[in-house]
Image (cartoon, rainbow, N blue to C red):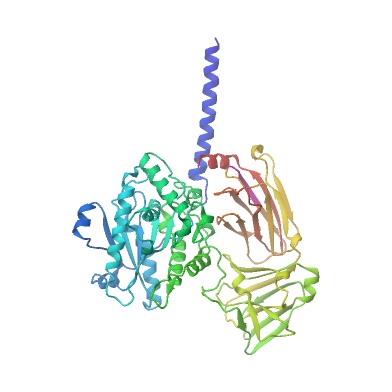
């Protein structure tokens, strides 16, 4: 008599577990924002010129090929070898096509045209015959050896040229990035053949599906080598993850192992990359226009003017990658930027003594320098914050030393600013600049373009608000809430007790505005201080905006930083921030 009831209870339990699994899978595959990547298009018909390999090499690897990307007249010109550009080798991933190089190649070609081919890149691509190396790892070692031969073949194409390259840059998508890292494990491989490695959605830490011992052994060999020899790896590596849209390769797997031991390596999620600010899925990461533009800008800034090749200076490489992929100051990259700037010319000097100031610039005929004396503000406030809606790359904010009403030279503080989608902003702690007597905001003469500049002095404690996240098992039935009533331009909401992968929440930001006639934009930036995985949400206020709160990388045990919701707000609006547990996203995090 008991057997039927036990069977019913078992059936109910299994049904319940299936429901939970289904809910988690739904969140993994569908619980993310829409694809905000712009498609990259070719301006002319893409052509792939097959590079002839030595007969012995072609016989040893009959299924593999090497191609050179080109378009139109550029493709015709480069059918006649040798080449004169800077070589970049693209490695496709699991079931990937060599033709995926076209987005990078086309954008780089357009950039070269803009500078009259002062410099240009030659994009090569390997055809791995679309092998399923993520499912069967038996071909990974063979692919690695073939890439080594391709690099040597590519460099021979520049033989006899005045600025012949001695190394190549590699861009590897998915498993292609792992193959690139595996080159170092080859006995006869010379590190000097690679000057830069950029990987896109590559699972560096472990295989997504360890289906056979070939894959697990390959990963163990590669990662052990990189961990044990990290201090001796002399080329720069950047790993870019796709974020939550990439359900094929979880972003946590893309962060390079033992990063702290390798000073020439960076790992970042695409949603945190300046001027990109979007999550990409596993395939769109190779054609997402925002990300490819950022990548190509970085490549051109990496060029050494003397050698006309990518610089060999590791400090410059990291500086360029930080500029384009980590924190962009809304300035063109300069290796040694001028710290002191001349503030001269026929300009108006206008003193500002208030603690909060707004200026709307439109059809300005004269240059204006607004000066903020700091002596009195230091007695009351701890910080100053300024923002501008003009997103040009000119210097706009300076510090003056021992000035009264005007200064001829100022410290260019623009390099410390941060570019965001609709503003560039700067926050300074006043005690860090004891020698500055004035802050100077520069408004150029403009015609037809309207922009707004805001500055305010504040005490840090008035802009930092603590918001504990709700308990894991509250199932969204309870919430934590804060209300921002004051008229500040930005706030830091400290998200307490949030640092684990299995946690997931929904944040709802409701904005209510009074007396607002024009459209106002607010920016909500989720800042994770222990890894580069920030994400931004742009909201037109008044509005109700929902933000997902979950992590790619758990907070390290020895890290005391707090995750922040950085809110760039309007002084005419009130903001209500509510956080509650998202049970479906928790299941998605567990399954992923």
Can you say which quadrant of the picture contains the N terminus? top right
Q: Nearer the viewer, residue 143 or 277?
A: 143
Percent x, y for residue 86? 35, 70
Position above or below: 64 against 49 = above
Please tell me which residue is depicted at 27% across the width and 75% down the height of the picture.
160
Please tell me which residue is depicted at 80% across the width and 75% down the height of the picture.
376
- Quarter holding residue 5: top right
Q: Which residues are magenta?
A: 502-508
Percent x, y for residue 182? 38, 53
Q: Nearer the viewer, residue 472 or 401?
A: 401
Q: Residue furthest top?
A: 1
- Quarter holding residue 192: bottom left
Percent x, y for residue 275? 52, 64
Overall secondary structure of the magenta section? strand
Number of residue marks: 0
Tell whether position 280 is magenta.
no
Position above or below: 244 against 460 = above
Please tell me which residue is depicted at 57% across the width and 56% down the height of the picture.
534
Residue 41 visible in the picture: no
Percent x, y for residue 321? 49, 65
Residue 147 visible in the picture: yes
């Amino acid at each position: 008599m008991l057997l039927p009831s036990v069977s019913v209870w078992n059936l109910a339990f299994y049904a319940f577990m299936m429901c939970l699994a289904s809910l988690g899978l739904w969140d993994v595959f569908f619980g993310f924002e829409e694809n905000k990547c712009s498609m990259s298009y070719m301006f002319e018909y893409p052509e792939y010129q097959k590079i002839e390999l030595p007969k012995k090499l072609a016989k040893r690897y009959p299924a593999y090929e090497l191609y050179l990307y080109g378009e139109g007249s550029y493709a015709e010109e480069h059918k006649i070898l040798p080449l004169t550009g800077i070589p970049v080798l693209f490695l496709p991933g699991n079931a990937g096509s060599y033709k995926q190089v076209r987005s990078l190649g086309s954008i780089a070609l357009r950039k070269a045209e803009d500078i009259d081919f002062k410099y240009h890149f030659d994009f090569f691509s390997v055809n791995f015959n679309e092998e399923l190396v993520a499912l069967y790892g038996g071909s990974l070692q063979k692919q690695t050896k073939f890439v080594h031969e391709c690099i040597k073949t590519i460099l021979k194409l520049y033989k006899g040229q005045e600025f012949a390259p001695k190394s190549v840059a590699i861009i590897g998508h998915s498993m292609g990035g792992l193959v690139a890292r595996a080159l170092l494990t080859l006995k006869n491989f010379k590190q000097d053949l690679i000057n830069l490695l950029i990987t896109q959605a590559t699972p560096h830490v472990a295989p997504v599906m360890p289906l056979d011992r070939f894959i697990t052994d390959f990963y163990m060999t590669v990662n052990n080598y990189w961990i044990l020899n990290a201090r001796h790896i002399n080329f720069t590596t950047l790993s870019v993850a796709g974020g939550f849209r990439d359900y094929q390769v979880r972003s946590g797997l893309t962060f390079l192992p033992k990063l702290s031991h390798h000073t020439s390596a960076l790992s970042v999620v695409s949603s945190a990359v300046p001027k990109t600010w979007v999550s990409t899925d596993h395939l769109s990461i190779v054609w997402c226009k925002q990300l490819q533009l950022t990548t190509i800008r970085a490549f051109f800034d990496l060029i050494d003017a003397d050698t006309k090749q990518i610089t060999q200076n590791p400090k410059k490489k990291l500086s360029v990658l930080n500029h384009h992929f980590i924190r962009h100051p809304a300035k063109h990259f300069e290796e040694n930027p001028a710290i002191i700037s001349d503030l001269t010319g026929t300009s108006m000097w206008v003193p500002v003594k208030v603690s909060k100031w707004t200026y709307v610039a439109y059809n300005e005929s004269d240059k204006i320098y607004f000066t903020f004396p700091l002596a009195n503000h230091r007695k009351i406030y701890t910080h100053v914050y300024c923002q501008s809606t003009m997103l040009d790359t000119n210097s706009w904010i300076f510090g003056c030393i021992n000035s009264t009403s005007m200064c001829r030279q100022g410290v260019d503080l623009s390099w410390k600013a941060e570019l965001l989608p609709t503003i560039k902003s700067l926050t300074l702690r006043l005690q860090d600049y004891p020698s500055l007597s004035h802050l100077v905001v520069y408004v150029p003469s403009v015609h037809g373009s309207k922009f707004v500049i805001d500055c305010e002095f504040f005490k840090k404690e008035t802009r930092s608000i603590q918001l504990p996240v709700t308990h894991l098992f509250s199932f969204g039935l309870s919430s934590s809430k804060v209300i921002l009533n004051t008229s500040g331009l930005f706030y830091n909401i400290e998200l307490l007790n949030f640092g684990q992968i299995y946690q997931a929440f929904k944040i709802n930001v409701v904005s209510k505005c009074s007396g607002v006639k024009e459209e106002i934009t607010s920016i909500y930036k989720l800042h994770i201080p222990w890894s580069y995985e920030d994400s931004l949400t742009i909201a037109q206020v008044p509005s109700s905006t929902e933000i997902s709160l979950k992590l790619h990388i758990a907070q390290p045990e020895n890290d005391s930083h707090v995750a922040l919701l950085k809110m760039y707000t309007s002084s005419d609006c009130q903001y209500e921030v509510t956080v509650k547990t998202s049970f479906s996203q928790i299941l998605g995090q567990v399954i992923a």
